[in-house]
Amino acid sequence: MSRYSDSLSAAWADHLAPREAAAPTVVSLFAGCGGSSLGYSMAGFSERLAVEWDDKAAATFRANFPDVPLFHGDVAKLSIEDALARSRLGPGDLDVLDGSPPCQGFSTAGKRDMADPRNVLFEEYCRLLRGFRPRLLVMENVSGLVKGKMRLTFVTILRKLKFCGYRVSARLLNAMYFGVPQSRQRLIFVGVREDLSAQSSHPLALRQAMGLRQAMGLRRGWGRIADGVKNKQFRNRFRSLDLPCVTLEKTHPPILCEGGSERELTLTECAAIGSFPPGFTWGAGAYQQIGNSVPPLFMKAIAVHLRGILRAASDATMTGRAADAGASIQADAC
């Protein structure tokens, strides 16, 4: 068993472990099949609500997270009152509001249409953000959002998140530097509510990425053709097996070139490359769901970092209360 298999098994055990009574809470919008949800669970979070409209993705989510309340439908039809009731939270109680609004209108793999109606779904994220008033926000999107004409939309999103009352930073992070054997660059927004004494920040990347051969235990080729993977959509772009895999697409599995032959990667292999452990259950539309997902180990790294921000904010609050109490005692003594 490779070190990567060991890390997946350990992360899966963390997901299955009972939650602490004081576990940080998360609500996931645009949850998909549960890639982000699994990452938060691996980091010890308690998920209070997930929202997903796609039937196949919702079915996969239910199969893997039976104890998480799921709103299966259009996020625009979820009122804040209903969301609070389903999550058993009041305004200001939630620790993290997470969301990955559909990115097809921004992606460099698509038409990059400014008028794509999916581009404004982040408005629904902002609406629920104002209702929940979480301590932290996280929003993920494709790197194309900061490229070319889409930068105007990026600036708009950043401004609106700040207008909701958060100190926000955004950074391009690649999953391959966070324990995932796949080159998958994403734009990650992190925000801290303005009344908290903590700064918005992102996790530090690992120094070395994991190659696909190392992660999957693939054998060396026989020299007839170069070993590697290529994917159909991007003109059969070729990548060595000693590097992380090409970005997994939602339509076509990558082609594995190994030992003089070519074949599509299997669902089991794609799931592992996406950092889904073997215990995760798949149904219809699995390849598309993996291609659309935030890799769980990537989100776990982000979630662990968020726990650090929450601790810093809590410590600062306790220190402030102690200082206030001391000042009050001194004033009474006078």
Image (spheres, rainbow, N blue to C red):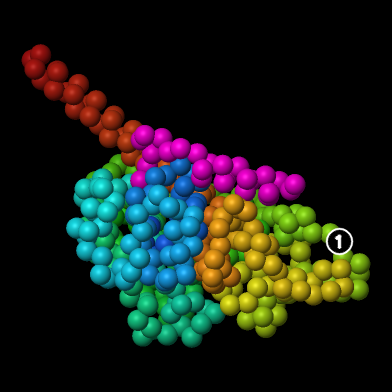
| 55 with respect to 134 (left or right) | right
- Residue 87's place in the image compared with 156, above or below, is above
- Residue 150 x, y percent position in the rendering: 42, 78
Look at the numbered disc 1 and give the secondary structure of its residue. loop
Q: Amino acid at mark 1?
A: Arg
| 107 with respect to 89 (left or right) | right
- Residue 318's place in the image compared with 276, above or below, is above
Label tally: 1
Magenta-drawn stretch contains 137: no
- At 52% from the left edge and 79% from the top edge, which residue is drawn? 108
| 235 with respect to 286 (left or right) | right
- At 63% from the left edge and 45% from the top edge, which residue is drawn? 9
- At 22% from the left edge and 29% from the top edge, which residue is drawn? 321
Q: Quick one: 141 or 259, which is closer to the camera?
A: 259
- Would residue 222 be seen by someone viewing this image from the given angle? yes
Residues in magenta? 1-27
The image quarter containing residue 122 is bottom left
- Residue 317 x, y percent position in the rendering: 27, 35
- Residue 156's place in the image compared with 315, above or below, is below
